Amino acid sequence: MAWINLIIAGLFEIGWPLGLKLSQTTNNKLAWILFAVFSMGVSGLFLWLAQKQIPMGTAYAVWTGIGAVGAFVTGIFLFKDPATVFRIVSVTFIIVGIVGLKLSHA
């Protein structure tokens, strides 16, 4: 269950940069800022739950990795962020690190 909590935390970690970006690019500034704050809170709660069983360093690295990769992909698809080869290779290294941390936690 701890890893499920960590994945949920990571998915909500994507929500707060998304909310902040949408608060800058739409007329619904307050609603998107509130969405970002809500996402931060839920993300933190699930990280807290995950850390009961997963070492803090592993949990934090995976949590931020999921958020970083998710924000990267979201930026490409929703905001036309650049999808250069170097950026994609670089984010692939983050994914490899997340998988490695999961596999090393037996």
Image (cartoon, helix red, strand yellow):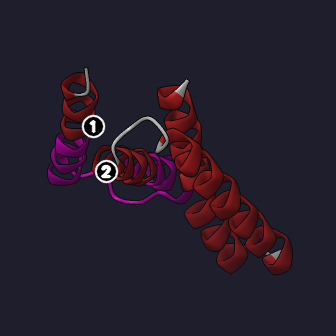
For marks 1 and 2, the one nearer the N-term is: 2
- The answer to whether any part of residue 27 appears in the image is no
Residue lying at 44% horizontally and 35% vertically, measured from the top left: 53
Q: Is residue 90 magenta?
A: yes
Q: Using the rendered view, name the quadrant where residue 18 is placed.
A: bottom right
CA–CA distance between discs 1 and 2? 7 Å
Residue tagged by mark 1? Answer: 98
Looking at the picture, tell me which residue is in the foreground, 54 or 23. 54
- The type of residue carrying mark 2 is Ala
Residue tagged by mark 2? Answer: 61
Residue at disc 1, secondary structure: helix
Q: Quadrant of the C terminus?
A: top left
Residue 54 against residue 73 in the figure, above or below? above
Whether residues under marks 1 and 2 lie with C-beta atoms below 8 angstroms apart, the answer is: yes
Residue lying at 64% horizontally and 63% vertically, measured from the top left: 40
- The answer to whether any part of residue 97 appears in the image is yes
Task: Give the residues drawn in magenta, as a range.
Answer: 69-94
